[in-house]
Image (tube, rainbow, N blue to C red):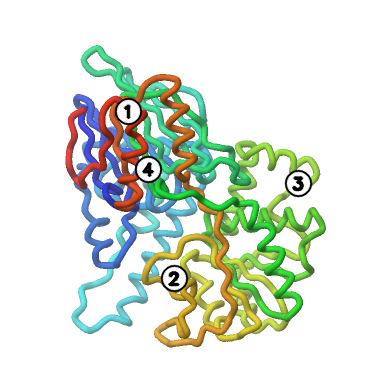
Amino acid sequence: MKLTFYGAAGEVTGSQHLIEVGERRILLDCGLFQGHRAESRAKNERFLCRPKDLDAVVLSHAHIDHCGNLPGLHKAGFDGPVFCTEATADVAQLMLEDSARIQEEDAKYLPRRLKPGHPPVEPLYTTKDVEGLLKQVQPLPYHAWQQLAEDVRIRFSDAGHILGSAITELEVAENGETRRIVFTGDLGRRGLPLLRDPETVQGCDILITESTYADRIHPNADDIRVQLQRILHEAATVGGRVIIPAFSLGRTQHVVYFLNDLYNAGKLPRIPIFVDSPLARRVTSVYRDHYRIMDDEVQAVLDSDHDPFSFPGLTYVQTQDESMALNRRKGAFVVISAGGMCEGGRVVHHLKHGVSKAENTIALIGFQGQYTLGRAIADRRPFVRIFDRQYPLKAHVETLSGLSAHADVDDFQWWFRAMHSDSSIGRAFVVHGEKDSAEAQVRALDEFCDEPALVPEPGKTYEV
């Protein structure tokens, strides 16, 4: 058996791992590399996995850095099945359609801002490519073993990361011996609202595990409720607006769920709340379609509240005109808008109109990448650049931690220990993490693996 790591090896994005057993070739994930535009383009438009020769793709979940280049793979000649959970299939459709639309719009409008003689801007893939790829998606249920071929079977368990996320178990026969491979995808956290905790699985011959936050411990997510209540009360008192940049998938649904919980408890201040993201509105509809796979807390809420993502005073903004009207609105209100690091989407316009007013609050949720507008705001710089213009940062800035959907040190230790207690872990490959977190994960795995774990080199093939 051969393993080759074409993405998220020694880095965080672009998940793409190839398994070769005899003549069979299975790709785990096919995500977009996200980074500086030129570097991202070079990595994303080139496939080293020989798309036409792939037998299948297994998709762990619908975040763009895991699913985002599947239409490009289709465009490059891959015509086999894509296996994922039912919820992942639904969410991935929205995420890929949105990705194609953004790329098509960039190809149309970016040339106007480029210097004469610049090479043409082309999308990596189009909406038509997404349509073709979606015909190849074959959803599978959680927990049931599925025979993909005479010598390959697969089972998904809940990873607890985002809606539909899965831990993949593959059993493949080679030379009369069955080998067992476990791929965590992105492992979620225990105790996070909405989603079920990550499920544990049996030991394996080969473990491929993420390591995004393998070197830290997350704050308690329950603190977010208290912080949101305080922030909204203060805004209602001074008549200011609260701007919450939040990713359309996952973060927005968590924030709305917390606000709904405050409303049900009679603790939500009387202040209008708007979700201003067309993608977040569509993703939330998919969440509603999959209540049955959410955690026990959600099931209990549903006994008395038919929709945990809606309450009086909450409005999902639909049109661009409605979005623009918010910036002319007087008095206190809350706007939750994509994207999470303030680098694109409608939230940038809300920040443009709100950062320089002292009565306003910007509530950042989660990590803000280096060189992003979100990081500049988190660092409370005196001036921030928005649309090539400097604006004084006078708004109050709040940073709300605790909503990371990735496992931390304690979660990983719990999960590895459960796997090891059932049966051994042979060899482990640590992916999807920056240098410090990946090395911390390697050290953590020492007590659980038969062989030393390692961080694979990008593009290198390992015989196992």
Q: In what element is the residue under mark 4?
A: strand
Q: Quadrant of the N terminus?
A: top left
Say whether disc 3 or disc 4 marks the residue closer to the N-terminus: 4
Query: Is residue 57 toward the left or the right of residue 98 in the image?
Result: left
Which amino acid, mark 4? Answer: Glu
Disc on res. 306: 3
Q: CA distance from mark 4 to mark 1?
A: 16 Å
Residue 142, relative to residue 59: is it above or below?
above
Q: Quadrant of the C terminus?
A: top left
Identify the secondary structure beneath mark 3: loop
Residue density around tag 2, few if under 14, some if 14–19, many if 20 or more, within 10 Å: some
Name the residue at 17% across, 42% down.
460
Image coordinates of residue 218 in percent, x first then y, are 51, 51
Residue 28 percent across, percent down from the top left = 33, 38
Question: How far apart are labels 3 and 2 at the CA level?
Answer: 37 Å
Q: Are marks 3 and 1 in contact (CB under 8 Å)?
A: no
Judging by the rendered image, the residue that carries numbered circle 4 is 210
Nearer to us of marks 2 and 1 is 1
Viewer-nearest of discs 3 and 2: 2
Of the numbered discs 3 and 2, the one sitting upstream in the chain is: 3
Task: For marks 2 and 1, give the CA distance.
Answer: 38 Å
Residue at disc 2, secondary structure: helix
- Could you say which quadrant of the image residue 384 lies in? bottom left
Question: From this viewpoint, which residue is outermost toward the top?
Answer: 176
Residue on which disc 2 sits: 375
Callout 3 amino acid:
His
Sequence-earlier tag: 3 or 1: 3
Judge left or right: residue 351 versus residue 133: right
